[in-house]
Image (spheres, rainbow, N blue to C red):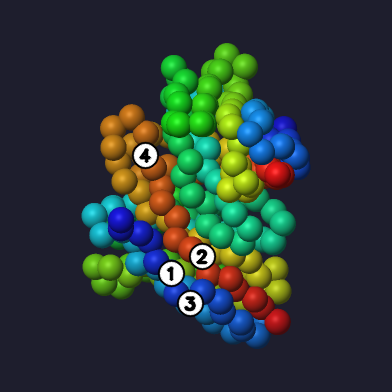
Amino acid sequence: RKEVEQDPGPFNVPEGATVAFNCTYSNSASQSFFWYRQDCRKEPKLLMSVYSSGNEDGRFTAQLNRASQYISLLIRDSKLSDSATYLCVVNGRIKAAGNKLTFGGGTRVLVKP
Amino acid sequence: EPEVTQTPSHQVTQMGQEVILRCVPISNHLYFYWYRQILGQKVEFLVSFYNNEISEKSEIFDDQFSVERPDGSNFTLKIRSTKLEDSAMYFCASRETSGITDTQYFGPGTRLTVL
């Protein structure tokens, strides 16, 4: 089983619509979780951290389900500029010097007018 | 807003040559990382560096790779004898520590092409 698994998409989304997708992770000891956004041939950029209680940042809502080991991202009122690849990222340890991030393969979202 | 910078943006080299990729992390960060992304594949961890030593490395980071922080600002990745399969985007990241979660910020990457 892959460490972090995502549906590659693409999710074709009409502008203004809502889109949601999940990612699953295999290491139950994982401590922190993130959604990064990556545009074509660019660096990953932090979209939001994901907390156990769930969190919202504007049109973006992230949820964590530790029991089922999945993370979700929901985008409301999609904009054309939301078109990107969304990377699910997991960190096994907090405050350890290593603290490597493990990336999923990404979910591609295409918002169309 | 402070950011991680990387040079060069694109490096083309011949197989067997040595390359050095350079990064300037965010100034008050203490933890530094290299990742790579082969075209069309996921981002993969290479190495983490803290307090002037490697703290963790992946299987990819073999004897051909080394990292160094030669001064107070630069963080470099050296590939001693490049192979065709080293062609990838190489991202440097640095980390802040802020309580509950530790966020890593990525530089714009160096595209390495090995011919």
Can you say whether A45 is above or below B17 in the image? Answer: above
Are both tags, 2 and 4, on one chain? Answer: yes
- In this view of the protein, which residue sits in the foreground, B63 or A47? A47
Instruction: Pinpoint the chain carrying mark 2.
Output: B
Can you say whether B37 is above or below A92 in the image? Answer: below
The residue sitting at 37% across, 54% down in the picture is B94
Image location of residue B98, percent across then percent down: 28, 37
Q: Which mark is residue A51?
A: none
Q: Quick one: quadrant of the C terminus of chain A?
A: top right
Label 1, secondary structure: give it: strand
Apparent side of residue A61 relative to residue A14 in the rendered image (left or right): left
Q: Earlier in the sequence, mark 1 or mark 2?
A: 1
Label 2, secondary structure: give it: loop
Instruction: Pinpoint the chain carrying mark 3.
Output: B
State the residue position of label 3: B8
Q: Are marks 3 and 1 in contact (CB under 8 Å)?
A: no
Label 3, secondary structure: give it: loop
Q: Earlier in the sequence, mark 2 or mark 4?
A: 4
Q: Which mark is residue B109?
A: 2
State the residue position of label 4: B102
Q: Are marks 4 and 3 in contact (CB under 8 Å)?
A: no
Apparent side of residue A13 relative to residue A48 in the rendered image (left or right): right
The residue sitting at 38% across, 61% down in the picture is B4
Q: Amino acid at mark 4?
A: Asp
Q: Amino acid at mark 3?
A: Pro
Can you say whether B56 is above or below B39 in the image? Answer: above
Q: CA distance from mark 4 to mark 3?
A: 27 Å
